[in-house]
Image (cartoon, rainbow, N blue to C red):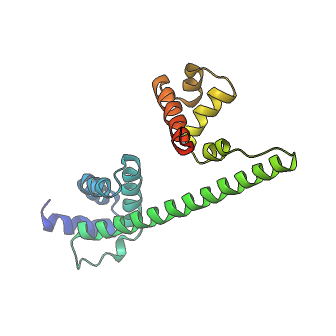
Amino acid sequence: MEKQDEQQLILQAKEGDDEAFTILFRHYYSFLYKYLLKLSLQHDVSEDLVQETFLKGYVHLRSFQGRSAFSTWLISIASRLYFDHQKKSKREKRRQKQVTDDTIRKIQWDISVRGEEWSVTLDLFSKLTPHLRTPILLHHYYGYTYSEIAKILHIKEGTVKSRVHKGLQQIRKECGR
């Protein structure tokens, strides 16, 4: 797109011409998507952030002064949104870890109150990621078959088997077996 054409479209979009903004959107969508994909390495995150970038750009278009290229302005919006997304993800992971730790402490307390003992195996099991812990629990505690677990979790049966194997392997490794 020629710089002069771009400037005209930006002026029209600032004046409320949604068609002009749509042309800018279509022109820069792929550029921003590829940039965000390289940052995040996740398709879904990149798609969401491109949409957010254009929404923010649309809402704040009047603040675009033209001191930089329009693409630079969009990149700065996208970058800030990506960094905000990263901070939010870290906060959410910390919050989820805290909830998990609190739950484990409660379970340990309940077990000790009943006069039972929290085993090393349970401790190691509790430290597995949920995607490994869930199929092990469903298979070894609740007795579901691999094919039933695959249907429950909406994953392939081979994936269930490999997760069970990997999770048990991690527990055995930590136990020194």
Compared to residue 26, the image places residue 148 above or below, namely above
164 vs 29, nearest the viewer: 164
The quarter of the image holding the N terminus is bottom left
Q: Is residue 71 visible?
A: yes
53 vs 90, nearest the viewer: 90
Q: Which quarter of the figure has residue 10?
A: bottom left
Q: Which quarter of the figure has residue 130?
A: top right
Report the residue at 50% width, 31% height from top.
165
Report the residue at 80% width, 53% height from top.
109
Report the residue at 14% width, 67% height from top.
3
* Residue 131 appears left or right of 51: right
Q: Is residue 155 visible?
A: no
* Residue 7 appears left or right of 54: left
146 vs 68, nearest the viewer: 146
* Residue 66 appears left or right of 5: right
* Residue 108 appears left or right of 44: right
Most extreme residue toward the front is: 177
Where residue 48 appears, x then y in whole percent?
Answer: 42, 53
Where residue 150 appears, x then y in whole percent?
Answer: 54, 25
Where residue 63 appears, x then y in whole percent?
Answer: 35, 77
Report the residue at 32% width, 58% height from top.
39
Query: Number of marks in the image?
Result: 0
